[in-house]
Image (cartoon, rainbow, N blue to C red):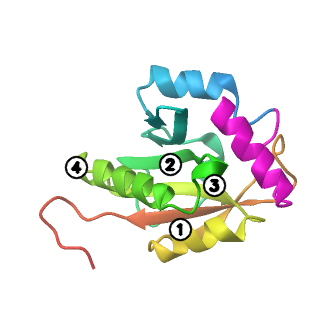
């Protein structure tokens, strides 16, 4: 939770109000742990970064016209890098890990959302080949939309486009 709170405070300092006292919640992280979907990059000083790679679709995502059918997909949530460790390629490495793991598991795609007011994150995912598809709303976080993205994955043995 310390990592999440540090990231939330850092975003707020930049005028990006996507995380707050309600999100991400302790309960969300406990569910991630229970499902064995939470990955943490740790250091001697404590957690440096985290990402969730889930096979569960959020109810809010069901209204999106995805590029692939709604089965055997992976969902990235709560990607966070401690402010003192940002700018070192850690988010890229976490996404490399998530995409590789999803491919090994035979997933059709990776889906995620990012805050419409966070242009840096939008560029990050677009530069990785993700396609923006639609918007969802999380009223407890913000009145602004969150943009949904999807990356189609090649099956093992296929070459990427």
Q: Can I make out residue 65 in this image?
A: no
Q: Could you classify mark 2 by the number of other residues whose Cα lies within 10 Å: few (under 14), some (14-19), or many (20 or more)?
A: some
Q: Could you classify mark 4 by the number of other residues whose Cα lies within 10 Å: few (under 14), some (14-19), or many (20 or more)?
A: few
For label 3, the SS is helix
Residue depicted at 46% across the width and 36% down the height:
43
Which residue position is annotated with label 3? Answer: 63
For label 4, the SS is helix
**Residue 44 percent location from the top left of the image:** 47, 31
Which residue position is annotated with label 1? Answer: 125
Q: Residue furthest bottom?
A: 161
Labelled pair 2, 3 in contact (Cβ < 8 Å) = no
Which residue position is annotated with label 2? Answer: 76
Image quarter for residue 122?
bottom right
Residue depicted at 38% across the width and 50% down the height:
98
Q: Is residue 52 left or right of residue 22?
A: left
Going from the N terminus, do you reach mark 4 or mark 1 first? 4
**Residue 58 percent location from the top left of the image:** 58, 41
Going from the N terminus, do you reach mark 2 or mark 3 first? 3
Labelled pair 2, 1 in contact (Cβ < 8 Å) = no
Going from the N terminus, do you reach mark 4 or mark 2 first? 2
- The Cα–Cα distance between marks 4 and 2, rounded to whole angstroms, is 16 Å
For label 2, the SS is strand
Which residue position is annotated with label 4? Answer: 104
Q: Is residue 30 left or right of residue 105?
A: right
Front label number (3 vs 1)? 1
- The Cα–Cα distance between marks 4 and 3, rounded to whole angstroms, is 27 Å
Q: Is residue 77 left or right of residue 155?
A: right
């Amino acid at each position: 939770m310390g990592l999440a709170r540090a990231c939330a405070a850092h975003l707020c300092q930049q005028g990006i109000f996507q995380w707050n006292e309600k999100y991400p919640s302790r309960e969300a992280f406990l569910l991630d742990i229970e499902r064995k979907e939470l990955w943490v990059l740790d250091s001697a000083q404590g957690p440096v970064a985290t990402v969730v790679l889930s096979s569960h679709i959020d109810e809010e995502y069901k209204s999106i016209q995805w590029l692939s059918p709604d089965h055997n997909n992976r969902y990235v949530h709560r990607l966070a890098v401690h402010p003192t460790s940002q700018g070192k390629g850690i988010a890229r490495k976490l996404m490399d890990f998530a995409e590789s793991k999803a491919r090994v598991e035979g997933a059709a795609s990776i889906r995620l959302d990012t805050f419409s007011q966070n242009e840096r994150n939008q560029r990050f995912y677009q530069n990785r080949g993700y396609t923006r598809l639609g918007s969802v709303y999380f009223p407890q976080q913000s009145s602004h939309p969150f943009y949904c993205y999807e990356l189609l994955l090649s099956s093992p043995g296929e070459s990427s486009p």
